[in-house]
Image (tube, rainbow, N blue to C red):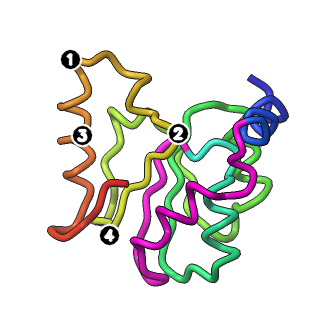
């Protein structure tokens, strides 16, 4: 899917105003280490950086066109990892994993619990999955 289509979808859904990201960000701290699952074209990352986020951000994405967009926009600012989340193992434990736009629904019901457990293994003991 072209990046422009994702941008239009965000606009059509009212997400270009960052309303969902702003709500999630209230539960984070500016120094938190974040892993964004399915970072897409970087909508959420753009918001975090606009807010002055100082913690490490790792963006996970598997779509080649979206990866290209993330690299174009944020390559020197964040860590970008081309991966399927089922295979990902972070080099560090994070304060939060963010999975917005209901990515969990992309997986069959019988895989969802195992996937949440897998992601929880990426988090510090007081980490959050948002």
Q: What stretch is highlighted in magenta?
A: 13-38
Magenta segment includes 20: yes
Q: Quadrant of residue 103?
A: top left
Q: Name the residue under label 3.
A: 116
- State if disc 1 and disc 4 touch (CB < 8 Å): no
Do residues under tags 2 and 1 come within 8 Å of each other at their CB atoms?
no
Q: In which quarter of the image is residue 77?
A: bottom right
Q: Nearer the viewer, residue 17 or 65?
A: 17
Q: Distance between the residues labelled 3 and 2?
A: 15 Å
Query: Mark 1 and 3 residues: CB-CB less than 8 Å, in contact?
Result: no
- What is the secondary structure assignment of the residue under circle 4? strand
Which mark, residue 95?
A: 4
* Residue in the picture at 70% in, 75% down: 50
Q: Where is residue 56 in the image (x, y as percent from the top left)?
A: 48, 73
Give whichever of 57, 9 is nearer the camera.
Answer: 9
How far apart in space, not on screen, are marks 1 and 3 (Cα)?
11 Å
Query: Which type of secondary structure does the marked residue at label 3 adopt?
Result: helix
Q: Answer left or right for 76 relative to 81.
A: right
Q: Which mark is first along the chain, 2 or 4?
A: 4
Between marks 4 and 3, how big is the CA–CA gap? 15 Å
Tell me the residue that label 1 is attached to. Answer: 110
From mark 4 to mark 1, how far is it between C-alphas? 27 Å
Q: What element carries label 1?
A: helix
- Residue that carries the numbered disc 2 in the rendered image: 101
From the viewer's perspective, is residue 116 above or below residue 96?
Answer: above
């Amino acid at each position: 899917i072209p990046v422009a289509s994702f941008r239009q979808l965000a606009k059509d859904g009212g997400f270009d105003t960052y309303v969902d990201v702003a709500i999630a960000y209230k539960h984070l701290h500016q120094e938190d280490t974040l892993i964004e699952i399915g970072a897409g074209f970087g909508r959420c990352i753009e918001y975090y950086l606009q807010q002055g986020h100082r913690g490490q951000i790792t963006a996970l994405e598997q779509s080649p066109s979206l990866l290209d967009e993330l690299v174009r926009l944020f390559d020197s600012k964040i860590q970008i990892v081309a991966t399927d989340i089922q295979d990902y193992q972070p080099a560090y434990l994070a304060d939060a994993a963010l999975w917005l736009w209901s990515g969990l629904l992309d997986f069959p019901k019988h895989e969802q619990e195992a996937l949440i457990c897998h992601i929880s293994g990426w988090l510090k003991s007081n980490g959050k999955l948002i």
